[in-house]
Image (cartoon, helix red, strand yellow):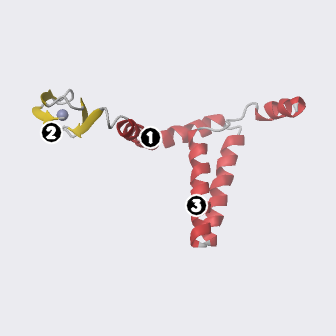
Amino acid sequence: MNGFREKMMRFMAGRRGIDQFSLALYILGFVLYLLALILSLPVLSLLSTAVWIYGLFRGFSRNIAKREAENRWFMGWFGPIAVKIKQAHVRFKNRKIYLYYRCPKCKCWLKLPRNVGEKHVTCGHCGASFTKKA
Ligand SMILES: [Zn+2]
């Protein structure tokens, strides 16, 4: 087992491995594969295989600069979406502790501890002030 591990480490030396873009490709490939099964569309199955092969190619590629550029491109548009998903998860987790609401002027998220009654609130982003009941 140790020999195998050593061989794998030697094989992966100088290669990119899994980054965020590759992980997203594997997940996308899996979703496409499931859709292909559900909708019985062979073209989706083919597409999922192509996406997986591209993900594997990226992981084993020795052209690290190119793969990093691809990952930067991916994170450039997916990063903000990932942040929004993470924030929505936190809001959901703390929904019983805080009342989350949007600022009426700039629409950014604000929170108040629940059961504080009516409060005068000033938005930290745009400075708009209003009253909110929590
Ligand atoms: Zn605001």
Mark 1 is surrounded, within 10 Å at the Cα level, by few (under 14), some (14 to 19) or many (20 or more) other residues, namely few
Classed neighbour count for the residue bearing mark 3: other residues with Cα under 10 Å, few (<14), some (14–19), many (≥20): many
Tag 1's secondary structure? helix
Q: Position of residue 8 (x, y in %)?
A: 81, 35
Residue 82 numbered mark, or none: 1
Which amino acid, by three-letter code, is at mark 1?
Ala
Quadrant containing the C terminus is: top left
- Asked whether the viewer can see residue 53, the reply is yes
- Splitting the image into 4 quarters, where does residue 130 fall? top left
Cα–Cα span, label 3 and label 1: 20 Å
The residue type indicated by label 3 comes to: Leu
Badge 2: few (under 14), some or many (20 or more) residues near its Cα, within 10 Å? Answer: few
Placement of the N terminus among the 4 image quadrants: top right
- Quadrant of the image occupied by residue 84: top left
Q: Position of residue 11 (x, y in %)?
A: 80, 35
Location of mark 2 (residue): 105
For mark 2, give the secondary structure: loop
Q: Answer with left or right where residue 100 lies relative to residue 81.
A: left
Q: Position of residue 126 (x, y in %)?
A: 17, 30
- Gap in angstroms between the C-alphas marked 3 and 2: 40 Å
Return the disc, 2 or 1, that comes first in the chain's sequence. 1
Q: Give the mark, 3 or 2, whose residue is nearer the N terminus.
A: 3
- Relative to the observer, which residue lies in front, 12 or 31? 31
Residue 10 x %, y %: 82, 31
Contact between labelled residues 1 and 3, with CB atoms less than 8 Å apart: no
Determine contact: label 3, label 2, CB under 8 Å: no
Q: Is residue 48 above or below residue 2?
A: below
Q: Which mark is residue 32?
A: 3
Ligand 1 within 8 A of label 2's CB? yes
Q: Is residue 114 left or right of residue 40?
A: left
Of residue 20 and residue 68, the one placed in the foreground of this image is 20
Q: Is residue 49 above or below residue 40?
A: above
